[in-house]
Image (cartoon, rainbow, N blue to C red):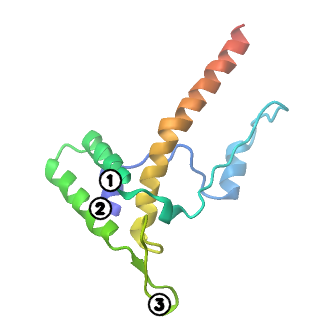
Amino acid sequence: MDKINHLAPLPHSFNIKNTQDLLKNLEGTPMLPHYNLALLDVTMLYSSIPVKENRAILANILTQKLKAPQTHQELLKWFDVITMQKYFAPKKQIIIQLDGLPMGAPSSGLIAEILLQHIEHSHLAHLTQKTQNYKLLQICG
């Protein structure tokens, strides 16, 4: 996990660490009556992650960030091995998971983050830009 995060780091543009981080980021931000504050959270995150689509997103990120095709292939093989192991053992009972990423696996967090970052940058970045353009039109018009 450290290798992939080092070689192809995710931007984490829209993430907050905790409540204190949120409050720090909001400090000094005017909250006018027509402003809306949105919080996005995912229910049953790991079991909701589509593995095939996530692999394609990872392959695209690696293609953009890495120059060495051998490292690219090694990381995709790592992804395949990790995502084929769909079991976890709470309270000493083995549970086989049918969909998504394995619960409790250390790699599941990073793999889920790849998809979340992709969604954020393909949708939220667009909305942020659209809102900024709208504010500019209001100021100039």
- Where disc 3 sits, the SS reads loop
Mark with earlier residue (1, 3) = 1
Amino acid type, mark 1: Arg
Q: Which mark is residue 28?
A: none
Marks 1/2 in contact by CB < 8 Å: the verdict is: yes
Element type where label 1 sits in the image = helix
Q: Residue at x 69, y 20 (%)?
A: 135
Q: Residue furthest front?
A: 98
Q: Which residue is mark 1?
A: 55
Q: Which residue is mark 3?
A: 93
| Distance (Cα) linking label 1 and label 3 | 29 Å
Image position of 91 with respect to 133: above or below: below
Please report whichever mark, 2 or 3, sits nearer to the chain's N-terminal start.
2
Spot occupied by residue 128 in the image (x, y as percentages of width and height): 59, 31
* Residue 79's disc number: 2
Horizontal and vertical percent position of residue 14: 56, 44
Q: Nearer the viewer, mark 2 or mark 3?
A: 3
Q: Which element carries disc 2, helix, strand or loop?
A: helix
Give the farthest residue toward the right.
Answer: 33
- The quadrant holding residue 50 is bottom left
Vertical side of 16 occupied by 135: above or below: above
Nearer to us in this view, 59 or 136: 59
Quadrant in the picture for residue 67? top left
